[in-house]
Image: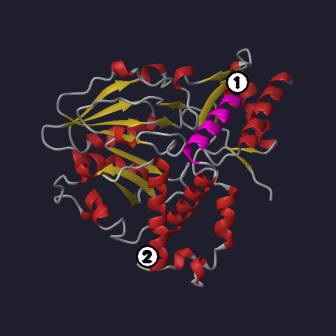
């Protein structure tokens, strides 16, 4: 079966094995004679799918029992509003570290809700790096500290996280969840849109400590309270059943690959192919991110010669490489190499980069 050399930033590549399994069961899931989209979300067949997805996340990420796993719609963008609505109260502040466009958007939404403080930022250096942990000084009245763990547009990533904080650490992990091993207990809450490493767009995973859910937020609309989802196993209303089903298959696939230890090593290898092609090009390719902040998920770069950059992107497209244009806000080139992007596809791109340089 022909598969595209897909480097799209999101929605992104899905594992071929997952799509094949879904195709096999497309018209008859669990011997029901129905597609998963046709099942009642109250049926025992769908409830099993739902539970499999929750338990798959718990196993792969080693999620402790005092954390809830929730499925919410609205993408990470809705979480930008739900977080301050649920956790910002009178005389408290939402602390934000700015490392790119998505953290800026999260801050902008929080400013509509309550008091905020951007406590660190790398905007002055065009978001080429992650702030030093020593430069992060939270306010005394902080309700939480919010970070974006991986920055898809600028190609930077947190490799260590703030610890021993007096307030919960909340992380938007939309673009690097499930890509490496993490300690869940470092965070009060993690959230992630599914359309990078978890599956298709349509569902957002929220992993949240139960203590945060206990806060009194009855003044909020029902669907904007985390406890609504926690108290109803994310089944208060009709969930995005197809997206959750495909998420469950992705989790099975990740487990079959050997879990996060193996996936993390593969991701390191994939990133090394591309960063070596950049670093060994004698300035022909220019990486955007500083080396100690480089993302393993989104490799961003420019060509020193802008005319050659346009030719590179066209030539890459002609050769079958999809999605290499940088984000429309900054241009350049970007290769998104999420879990489902096969290692040999990344190797082929690295070889294409080297060949293009040699022939230019």
Query: Is residue 225 shown to the viewer in this render?
Result: no
| Residue 233 vertical position relative to residue 42 in the rendered view, above or below | above
Left or right: residue 78 versus residue 56 is left
Q: How many marks?
A: 2
Element on which disc 1 rests: helix
Q: Cβ–Cβ below 8 Å for labels 2 and 1?
A: no
Q: Nearer the viewer, residue 19 or 56?
A: 56
Q: Residue at x 75, y 32 (%)?
A: 350
Element on which disc 2 rests: loop
Q: Residues within 10 Å of mark 2 (few under 14, many from 20)?
A: some
Q: Which mark is residue 84?
A: none
Q: Which of 292 and 334 is in front in this view?
A: 292
| Residue 233 vertical position relative to residue 339 in the rendered view, above or below | below
Quarter of the rendering occupied by the N terminus: bottom right
In x, y percent, where is residue 56? 49, 58
Q: How crowded is mark 1: few (under 14 residues within 10 Å), some or many (20 or more)?
A: few
Q: Name the residue under label 1.
A: 276
In x, y percent, where is residue 258? 61, 48
| Residue 163 vertical position relative to residue 57 in the rendered view, above or below | above
Q: Which mark is residue 41?
A: 2
Report the magenta stretch's main SS: helix
Q: Residue at x 35, y 66 (%)?
A: 233
Q: Residue at x 64, y 79 (%)?
A: 27
Residues rendered magenta in the picture = 259-273
Left or right: residue 331 versus residue 57 is right
Q: Is 285 in the magenta?
A: no
User: Distance between the Cα atoms at labels 2 and 1?
Assistant: 48 Å
Q: Which of marks 2 and 1 is nearer the N terminus?
A: 2
Left or right: residue 195 versus residue 65 is right
Quarter of the rendering occupied by the C terminus: top right
Q: Is 270 in the magenta?
A: yes
């Amino acid at each position: 079966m022909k598969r595209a050399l897909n480097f799209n930033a999101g929605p992104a590549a899905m594992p071929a094995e997952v799509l094949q399994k879904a195709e096999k069961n497309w018209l008859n899931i669990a011997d029901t004679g129905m597609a998963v989209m046709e099942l009642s979300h109250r049926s025992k067949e769908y409830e099993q799918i739902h539970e499999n997805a929750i338990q798959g996340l718990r196993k792969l990420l080693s999620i402790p029992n005092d954390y809830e796993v929730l499925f919410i719609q609205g993408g990470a963008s809705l979480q930008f509003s739900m977080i301050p609505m649920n956790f910002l109260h009178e005389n408290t502040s939402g602390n934000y570290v700015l490392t790119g466009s998505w953290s800026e958007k999260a801050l902008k939404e929080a400013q509509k809700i309550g008091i905020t403080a951007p406590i660190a930022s790398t905007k002055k250096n065009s978001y080429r790096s992650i702030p030093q942990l020593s430069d992060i000084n939270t306010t005394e009245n902080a309700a939480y500290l919010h970070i974006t763990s991986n920055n898809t547009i600028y190609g930077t990533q947190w490799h260590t996280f703030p610890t021993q904080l007096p307030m919960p650490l909340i992380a938007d992990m939309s673009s690097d969840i499930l890509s490496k091993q993490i300690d869940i207990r470092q965070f009060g809450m993690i959230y992630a849109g599914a359309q990078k490493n978890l599956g298709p767009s349509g569902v957002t995973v929220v992993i949240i400590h139960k203590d945060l859910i206990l806060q009194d937020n009855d003044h909020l609309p029902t669907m904007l309270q985390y406890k609504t989802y926690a108290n109803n196993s994310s089944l208060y209303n009709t969930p995005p059943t197809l997206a959750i089903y495909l998420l469950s298959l992705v989790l099975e696939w990740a487990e079959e690959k050997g879990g996060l230890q193996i996936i993390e090593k593969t991701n390191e290898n994939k990133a090394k192919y591309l960063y070596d092609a950049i670093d060994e090009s004698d300035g022909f390719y220019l990486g955007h991110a500083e080396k100690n902040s480089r993302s393993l998920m989104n490799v961003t770069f420019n060509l020193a010669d802008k005319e050659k950059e346009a030719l590179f992107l066209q030539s890459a497209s002609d050769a079958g490489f999809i999605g290499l244009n940088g984000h429309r806000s900054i241009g350049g080139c970007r290769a998104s190499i999420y879990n489902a992007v096969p290692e040999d596809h990344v190797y082929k791109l690295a070889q294409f980069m080297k060949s293009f340089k040699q022939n230019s």
